[in-house]
Structures are given as C-alpha cells and as structure tokens.
Amino acid sequence: MPGDLLDAIGGTPMVELRRLAPSSAVRLYAKLEGANPTGSVKDRIARSMITEARASGALRPGQTIIEPSSGNTGISLALVGSLLGHPVRIVMPDNTTAERTQLLNLYRAEIVYSPGAEGSNGAIRLAQQMADADPTIYMPYQYGNPANPRAHEETTGPEILAVVPEIDVFVAGLGTGGTLTGVGHFLKRARPGVRIVAAEPLPGEEVQGLRSLDEGFVPPVLDQSVLDDRYLVSNRDALIGLRRLMRDEGIFAGLSCGAVVHVALRVAAEMESGNVVMLLADGGWKYLSTDLWTREIEELETELESSLLW
Amino acid sequence: MSTVRIPPVLRETVGGARTVDAVGATVAAVLDDLFARHPALRDRVTDEGQLSRFVNVYVNDRDVRYREGLDTPVGPDDTVILLPAMAGGSR
C-alpha cells in the first residue's frame, strides 16, 4: 500500500555515469536527489527535523515553523509543514531565483527577505532574531539540528552502500555539512578507508564583502573530522560541470551538482581504479529562469558573483 | 613568487589590494612573508600563533587542513586563498 508524499521521500535513483568516467577502471555513480518530492535532498532533513521535533514535543500541533534558507530547505519545510498542519515562514536572501518564491508561495509558506549581500549568514541572523523575539515560533535550524545529519546517516548512506558496496570515494556539496557528516559517519563505519570529499562554493566578492572574521561561522552539524579533502569550486567550473552533466549524461541538475561533478572528476582523474559516488542534491528546475545551460559563461559568472544559487 | 588572494574583509590590512605577491615554499613561509610586511594581517588571522578556525586557507582549490596544514607546499605559480569560514552553501 502506498503511503503519502512524506513516505515517498528518499529511495532516490542511482545511476552510473559511463560517459563522464575517465576510464573503465574508475567508475562514477550519481545519486539523483532531484527525484525527491520537492526536487531536492532537503526533503530528507525537513521530514526528519519536523517529525523528530513533533515526537519530542519541541514542536506542538499547529505551531509555526521559521527557518533561514535560500531555497531548497525552505521549500521542503513548506511541503512538510503544509502536510502536517504547521504554518511555515522562510527567511531568504533577496537575490535568489524567481522559482523559489513561486514554489514557496504554492506550498503556502510566508517569505521574509533578508539582504542578499549578507548571504546565508544574513538570513540566519534575521531568522534567529525573529525566533528569539517570539517564543511561540519553532526554528528547526538545519545548521545545528542533529536530525539533519541523522537523516543522511540513516537513509542516504545506507541507500548508497546498498547499490555500491565497494565505494571508495563519496563527493557531495558543502552547505550545512549535514550530508557529508551523516553519510560520512555511516560509510566510515561500514567501509573504513572510504574517502569523504567536500565541494565548496567559492563565494562571489559581493557575498564575501560584508562578512567579518569575528562572525566566522562553522555550522555545528558539520563534523570536519569526517572530511578527507575539501575543494573550492568557482562558479565557472561549476557551470562547466553542470553542462557536461546535461550534455554527456542527460542529467538536468542544480548548480551545486556541477561543482560536485567537477570535484568528482578531479578526484577520479588521480585514481587508477575504484568507485566514486557523488550526490547530486537537486534538479535543474529552480534554475531555469537563470538559464545556466545556454548563456555565455562570462555573463553568468558576473551575475553569479552577487547571487546565491547553492 | 606566489599570489595570495585576500578576502574583502582583510583588505584594509594590506592597503586595499585584492591580491598580493609573497615568497615562500610552504603555506607557513608564505604567510610569514606576508605578515612581515603587513603585521595587521597577522593579528586578524591568527589566534595565539595558530590560524583562526574561522579562516580557511587553500592552495589553489584545496583546503590545506586536509593536506599538510601550514606545511603544505606552495609553488611559484600557485595561488593561496584566504577565506572567512561561512555557511558553505545556501540551501
């Protein structure tokens, strides 16, 4: 018997990327998280954070949820909140794509905009102020909520190992650190010697601009000790990776996936043999208005300097 | 001579430059060379002699924390990038 949409989260397809693999001895696999109900990996953590908070009593029936997010987590929480009867308020930088606003509206979430130049940290700060000022609001806070990495330790990691038991390298994007931490802990227990590799966005000048070192931020859910390597990826390299995914493998994915492919190919090029699994966090739908696939890369690079797409 | 990229928040310590040249065969040597000429930078990125945990250092695109830390080699054509730690992505 099928369950509802919450039961349809996870269990995403895994495909082999034969056309992108550098040789037949190094095999590349991609976990397609865009196949989740709202189109991103964040459905997993929205479900785990909300169901755990409801079970512990931290979130009462009908209580409002607030969360800082520039996109995917907000949309996932909006779905979960609407199915479970919680109003959802998302604090989002004002320079993300139109599709995010459209989707949040469709799921009946309320949007509060934070200054885009302050990046995700600005949204986090504003959401925290709003939650502090109103104790009736519940903030799951994906950056610090153990239910975030736990969702990956309990679902994403086992799903990957079941399909590629001989995994040697796992590559994912670094956002909150929840995916890398949760999958990393699971895989290291199951297969000692596996390498966990992070792809990190090189923030544009404007996004970097207003930050001070005093408010430096390492997300509490990120366990840096689980990482074996960490690569900084420019928007240019992420766009090239994204287009290769589309052209060579027919995979329509979001910008961070391009960065993950870039890093996976770099790592694979240095291997003689082995299995590399990458997690592609979302589908390309929310980026259509930005037209990441056909515009001049130089023009897009300039635009991406001042915006937050992953 | 390698290139060091300075984030906006630290540029005042190096006279406003986006990038500066520095000499050294390791990350530590490159930073020492920079600190000698820009002492204000040292105060901002180190804490009791250690690099602040809120500053990430990369040689080209790799975080040195997962290589050999301050002993990571730096070649003359390499770029050292200093970045404030921030919420890595935005999802």
Image: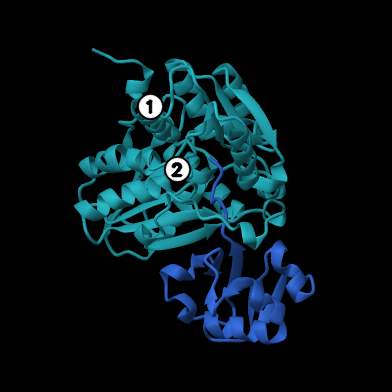
Q: Is residue A20 something one can see in this rendering?
A: no
In the picture, the disc for residue A57 is 1
**Distance of mark 1 from mark 2, alpha carbons?**
48 Å
Where the C terminus of chain A falls, by quadrant? top right
In terms of depth relative to the viewer, which is nearer, A252 or A308? A308
Rendered hue of chain A is cyan
In the picture, the quarter occupied by the N terminus of chain A is: top left
Residue A131 in percent (x, y) is at 58, 34
| Secondary structure at numbered mark 1 | loop
Considering the numbered disc 2 on the image, is that residue within a helix, a strand or a loop? helix
Image height check: is B31 above or below B52? below
Q: Give the amino acid type for the residue marked by disc 1 in the picture.
A: Gly
**What label does residue A248 carry, if any?**
2
Location of residue A73 with respect to A248 vertically, above or below:
above
Point out residue B59 in the picture as x, y percentages from the top left corner. 53, 71
- Callout 1 and callout 2 share a chain: yes
Horizontal side, residue A129 vs residue B75: left or right: right
| Chain B tint in image | blue
Residue A32 location, quadrant: top left
Location of residue B34 in the rendering, given as x and y in whole percent from the top left corner:
66, 82
Residue at horizontal 39 percent and vertical 52 percent from the top: A171
- Label 2 neighbourhood size at 10 Å, few (<14), some (14-19), many (20+)? few
Is A132 above or below relative to A277? above
**Residue at 63% over, 33% down:** A133
Which of discs 1 and 2 lies nearer the camera? The answer is 1
Is A80 in front, or is A102? A80
Which residue lies at the image location 58% right of the left edge and 21% below the top edge? A109
Q: Residue at x 24, y 41 (%)?
A: A158
Which numbered disc, 1 or 2, marks the residue that appears first in the sequence?
1
Q: Callout 1: residue from which chain? A: A
